Image (cartoon, grey):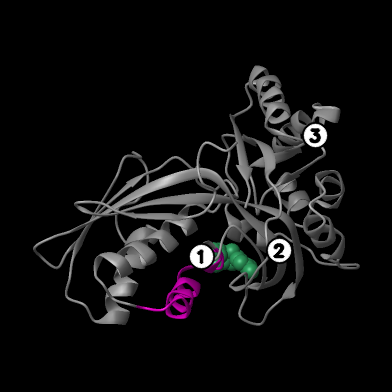
Amino acid sequence: MREAPCIMIIRPTSEGVHILAPAKLNLFLEVEGKRSDGYHELTTLMVTVDWHDELQFEQTAGDAIVFTCDHPTLPLDADNLVVRAANLLRHATSTAQGAKIHLTKRIPSQAGLAGGSSDAAATLSGLNTLWDCRLTQADLANLAAQLGSDVPFFLNGPAAICRGRGELVTPVPVLREYHFVLLCPPTGVPTALAFRHLKLSGHRRSLDNCLNAWMAADPQRLGHALFNRLQPVAEQLVPRLTQTRDALKSLGPLLDGHLMSGSGSTYFGLCRNGAVAHAAARKLQTLEQGIVRVVACGP
Ligand code: C5P
């Protein structure tokens, strides 16, 4: 059994609102083409997993957004998506209310796990509740898309096909539990850089195999159908990522498949069950290549 939920969880508290904001993995990511606005057209299958940042939202007497974070190097100004999300919601609803927001950061940054996007989605949902704005899911999705391509997905977890820039979200059911082992190397990959260095040629991979395996709830088939167009680009930009990939590869039959998530730099292995994922994690830990974590997603 999973120890924690794999979706965004919103809980009212005596002081305000508490949210668990999950990380995501991309099980499939194809880049269909470059758009005239500079973004890339994507087809991706994303799932949320039970690894969370935590956010606490509290009412204040004044109208300021007071943001604090336990992570020493994250920006606390509008460079942080949490602050941007709070300001955007305030502007969209013309509210004069303020809030104290505290972020406990657990999901690594620039890791392909979209922790910052998840925090932004949590902020929209949390302040919508705290301030009693009564925006609909559609209103929130619209604001989320203005904050980043991955943000709308987190309003729709635990699994979805995302198209367009990533903001066109079609939820898909999760019919069984899936277990993953993650290896997050210390070097991140900036998303914009990965897309900028991508050279598109040849045919595009169809989502069909991966989606059929997902809908058949068959981890072995799913393991064979994992695909990420951005992985070779990230490995060119950060050559040490090939070591991360090789570490996963060295686990052999412990994994049904392995892949880099998003634009990197986290790699994940898909495992038959939780016990196998923990056995894989113990082996990865001995290699000392980065943060090792077992996660799951499920219904
Ligand atoms: O949307 P987001 O701010 O997360 O994207 C970060 C950067 O990644 C964009 O500025 C863009 O360079 C690149 N990107 C892209 N196509 C996408 C998503 C992101 O080119 N679909």
Name the residue type under label 2.
Thr
Name the residue type under label 3.
Leu
Quadrant of res 195: bottom right
Q: Which mark is residue 151?
A: 1
Which residue is under mark 2?
44
The Cα atoms of the two marked residues, 1 and 2, are separated by 14 Å
User: Image point 87% across, 49% down: which residue?
Assistant: 221
Give the residue at the far left of this rendering. Answer: 61
Quadrant of res 268: top right
Which residue is under mark 3?
255
* Label 3 Cα neighbours within 10 Å, binned few <14 / some 14-19 / many ≥20: many
Residue 3 is inside the magenta segment: no
Residues at circles 1 and 2 in contact by the CB criterion of under 8 Å: no
Name the front one of labels 1 and 3: 3
Range shown magenta: 135-153
Residue 177 position (above or below residue 152): above
The Cα atoms of the two marked residues, 3 and 2, are separated by 21 Å
Residue 136 seen by the camera: yes
Q: Secondary structure at mark 2?
A: strand
